[in-house]
Image: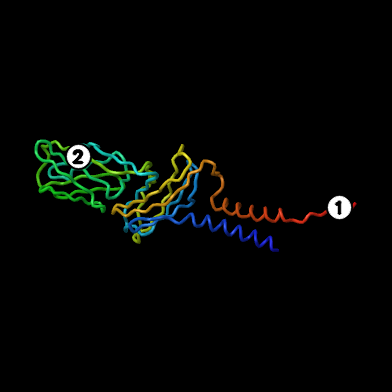
Amino acid sequence: MENTKKAIATAVLILSIFSMAFISTASAVGSITLTPNAQAPGGTVTVTGTGFGATKAIGIGLGSEVAVTGEDHTPTGTGTGPWMTRTNHYPIKPGSFSFHSNVVGSSETDFTDKGDGTMSTTSTYDAGSWLYYVTGAFGRSSTMDLSSSELIFTAAYKYYQYNVTPPSNPNSTATGTFTATITVPTGLANGNYNVTAIDAGGNTATATLTVNSAIPEVLPWNVMLLLSAFAVIAGFRFSRKPRIHAKI
């Protein structure tokens, strides 16, 4: 009986360790959890978020931050704008973005992301400027007609190694929650990677995903967890089973 109690206690400890692994770290007001929090390349992970903006588009990045500088774009638009273009990579880390607007032969101005999808600038011709973290779209409007001018936008920002935003383009609910299924990129090396969720208002949250190519993809994670616990219990009971010696 005592051995059985020890085995059950060990199994409970294992289950507790697995449960603690689902706790995420968060920035801003959002938080996310990953189910499962360990997966093989090519496998899927469900991302569940709370505390995001109401009915906002959600972008999801995986991996470390990557810095970009000197990325030139030719925006499109008419008249006073908006004149818009898109970064080469996204989603974008809120607060990391800036761009230099060159109206060739006329004026040059800098715009800086305020972390909420809007820009600050000293331009006296500014009529609004925008950044969409999820899609990388950005641009500006002007109080002057820029149709006859050549415009060049030069951007600097941070993005994440992999854009794993689902093709369905998830949105948060009216209460700021969302659920999305991402796919771990094939060929990804084993290790721990940050999963970062961002909404259009700049709210972000991060959790850690363990990538391990040895994880079987044929069984659901919860089944694997239960089998592991039962294996521990069975192992303890077998090792303590009394031996019966035949009488000679």
Q: In the image, 210: left or right of 140? A: right
In terms of image quadrants, where is residue 56? bottom left
Choose the circle earlier in sequence order: 1 or 2. 2
| Residues packed near mark 1 inside 10 Å, few (<14), some (14 to 19) or many (20 plus) | few
In the rendered image, residue 213, in percent from the top left (x then y), is placed at 51, 41
Q: Amino acid at mark 2?
A: Phe
Question: What number is the disc on residue 1?
Answer: none
Disc 2: which residue: 153
| Residue at the image position 53 percent from the left and 56 percent from the top | 17
Q: Amino acid at mark 1?
A: Ala
Badge 1 vs badge 2, beta-carbon distance below 8 Å: no
| Residue at the image position 37 percent from the left and 51 percent from the top | 197
Disc 1 element:
loop
In the rendered image, residue 127, in percent from the top left (x then y), is placed at 14, 50
Quarter in which the N terminus is drawn: bottom right
Q: Is residue 8 above or below residue 110?
A: below
In terms of image quadrants, where is residue 136? top left
* Residue in the foreground of this view, choosing between 217 and 80: 217
| Residues packed near mark 2 inside 10 Å, few (<14), some (14 to 19) or many (20 plus) | many
* Residue in the foreground of this view, choosing between 63 and 222: 63
Q: In the image, 74: left or right of 223? A: left
- Colour convention: rainbow
Question: What number is the disc on residue 246?
Answer: 1
Q: Which marked residue is nearer to the observer: mark 1 or mark 2?
A: 1
Q: In the image, 101: left or right of 175? A: left
Label 1 to label 2: alpha-carbon separation = 88 Å
| Residue at the image position 66 percent from the left and 62 percent from the top | 5
In the rendered image, residue 210, in percent from the top left (x then y), is placed at 47, 47
